[in-house]
């Protein structure tokens, strides 16, 4: 267990292992996304009230779920970086921020597109929507802070502190729909008790949520590989890898 | 000579920071002047109708107070960083936790506290209901303390950067938003005739939370900034 943990700190090992993970995870993710999208968009019954417009949940919900989970990944990487002074955790933190920001943006965008025909407006200042916007700002703040530092080692640590401070907002976003019930509906999928969504619509959604998690992992690993190469550009193993 | 204890040290540090601020009265006045000027912008932009201004007043006063606080956030550690006394503070045997707390308290005394005390004047100018003024004052007293603590985290993380001014706003504004929500909601509550106590209680809870955790983040941020 601990030897595995120590190996995580080694850039060449991490670069190699992430390459071999991506080799099977990336095709699997794309397959899952294609299957889930086809299933959800073409082979489920239309909603009796919303018709076909509800199908956007097959993008909106997975993106929103993984956008929130991505923040935890980033904050955990930050904690690891601060506690064990692991440089690769900084790379992971920097790699997670743009992916999380993109997913948050997708969740906000698809929500707006769905909101126009259903709620009659592109945007409302509802608790869930506002807090997702704050999440986007948190992600962008981490990127801005990282880029402001010339010393990338300090940049990683400063972003680690910032992302840990930001975790106070995440439970608020999760619970916002229950605490301030306004326009955005509360969660339909529950781990405890029956879900308020029909199984025929739920299964493709679950497949897509899993696929989005996998997609996040793939993007994270790919970003990390670029980050590792940039960071280690002067070392022997990278120069050998690129054939210098 | 023995080193002063934790409390004595914090007390002396607090005194030093306040004296340093009082020696530059113009810098204390600047955020307050900003507060006054931005308040004067609203009747020009929204029209001087008393009813309109009164309905926007709780939110306006809170937003302006927040922006004034943002302006002074950057200066918290800046001069101590430039003359090297921040480094001495980090090397001192006393815990950094209490030291940064004194720095923030000193800054709040000359910014947030004065801002809150001045706010009734502007509230009257914006035609806010007289009954709402005590709640405005109380919500600003609690809220600006939270803002100063959160702003301190941003200041600690950006103090080593040459172009930190804009960045600090981007970093800490997301954390200012919850304070703004409950601060202006408290004042709004009085106007609509519901009790303001729940909102004030949440602000007080935020203050307790920030008091406990923000100094930790500030201390970590300062160590990173000094190392960089």
Image (spheres, coloured by chain):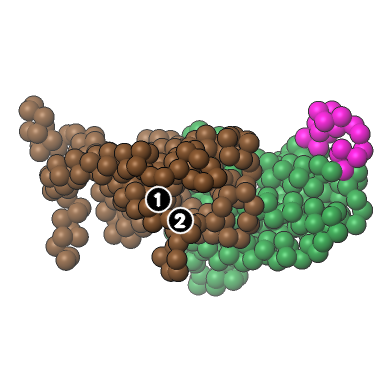
Chain colours: A brown, B green
Task: Identify which residue is drawn at 86% across, 39% down.
Answer: B53
Location of residue A8 (image quadrant): bottom left
Chain of residue at mark 1: A
Q: Is residue B82 visible?
A: no
Which percent across, then down, holds residue A84?
29, 59
- Label 1 residue SS: helix
A152 sits left or right of A229 in the view: right
**Viewer-side residue, B195 vs A78:** B195
Task: Identify which residue is drawn at 50% across, 40% down.
Answer: A51
Would you place residue A157 above or below residue A51 in this image?
A: below
Location of residue A192 (image quadrant): bottom left
Which of the labelled discs sits on residue A197, or is there none?
Answer: 2
Magenta-tinted stretch? B38-54
Would you place residue A110 above or below residue B145 in this image?
A: above
Which percent across, then down, holds residue B157?
48, 47
How far apart are the alpha carbons under marks 2 and 1?
Answer: 7 Å
Kindly check if marks 2 and 1 are in contact, taking CB atoms under 8 A apart as contact. Answer: yes
A138 sits left or right of B63 in the view: left
Q: Is residue B202 visible?
A: yes
Task: Identify which residue is drawn at 80% across, 57% down.
Answer: B189
Which of the labelled discs sits on residue A201, or is there none?
Answer: 1
Task: Identify which residue is drawn at 16% across, 60% down.
Answer: A4
Q: Is residue B90 one of those drawn in magenta?
A: no
- Counting other residues with Cα less than 10 Å from the Cα at mark 1, is it few (<14), some (14-19), or many (20 or more)? some
- Counting other residues with Cα less than 10 Å from the Cα at mark 2, is it few (<14), some (14-19), or many (20 or more)? few
């Amino acid at each position: 267990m601990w030897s595995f943990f120590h190996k995580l700190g080694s850039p060449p090992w991490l670069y190699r292992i992430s390459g071999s993970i991506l080799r099977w995870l990336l095709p699997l993710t794309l397959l899952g996304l294609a299957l889930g999208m086809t299933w959800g968009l073409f082979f489920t019954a239309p909603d009796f009230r919303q018709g076909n417009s509800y199908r956007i949940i097959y993008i909106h919900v997975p993106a929103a779920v993984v956008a929130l989970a991505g923040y935890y990944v980033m904050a955990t990487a930050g904690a690891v970086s601060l506690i064990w002074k692991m440089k690769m955790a900084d790379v992971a933190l920097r790699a997670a921020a743009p992916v999380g920001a993109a997913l948050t943006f997708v969740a906000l965008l698809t929500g707006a597109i769905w909101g126009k025909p259903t709620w009659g407006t592109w945007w409302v200042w509802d608790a869930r929507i506002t807090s997702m916007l704050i999440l986007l700002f948190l992600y962008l703040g981490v990127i801005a802070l990282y880029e402001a530092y010339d010393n990338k080692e300090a940049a990683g640590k400063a972003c680690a502190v910032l992302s840990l401070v930001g975790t106070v907002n995440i439970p608020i976003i999760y619970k916002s729909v229950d605490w301030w019930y306004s326009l955005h509906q509360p969660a339909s999928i529950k781990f405890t008790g029956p879900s308020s969504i029909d199984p025929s619509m739920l299964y493709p959604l679950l497949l897509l949520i899993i696929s989005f998690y996998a997609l996040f992992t793939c993007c994270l690993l790919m970003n990390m590989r670029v980050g590792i190469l940039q960071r280690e550009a002067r070392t022997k193993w990278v120069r050998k890898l690129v054939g210098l | 000579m023995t080193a002063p204890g934790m409390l004595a040290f914090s007390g002396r540090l607090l005194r030093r920071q306040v004296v340093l601020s009082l020696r530059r009265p113009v810098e204390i006045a600047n955020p307050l002047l900003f507060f006054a000027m931005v308040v004067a912008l609203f009747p020009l932009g929204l029209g001087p109708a008393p009813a309109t201004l009164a309905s926007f007043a709780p939110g306006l006063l809170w937003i302006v107070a927040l922006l004034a606080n943002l302006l002074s956030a950057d200066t918290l550690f800046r001069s101590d960083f430039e003359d090297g006394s921040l480094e001495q503070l980090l090397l001192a045997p006393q815990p950094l936790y209490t030291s940064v707390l004194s720095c923030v308290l000193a800054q709040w005394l000359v910014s947030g506290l004065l801002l809150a005390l001045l706010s009734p004047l502007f509230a009257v100018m914006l035609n806010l209901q007289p009954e709402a003024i005590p709640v405005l004052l109380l919500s600003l007293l609690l809220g600006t303390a939270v803002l100063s603590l959160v702003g301190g985290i941003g200041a600690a993380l950006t103090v080593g950067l040459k172009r930190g001014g804009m960045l600090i706003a981007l970093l800490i504004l997301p954390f200012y938003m919850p304070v703004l929500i409950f601060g202006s909601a408290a004042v709004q509550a009085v106007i609509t005739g519901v009790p303001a106590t729940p909102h004030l209680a949440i602000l007080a809870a935020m203050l307790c939370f920030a008091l406990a955790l923000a100094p930790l983040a500030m201390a970590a941020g300062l160590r990173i900034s000094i190392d960089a």
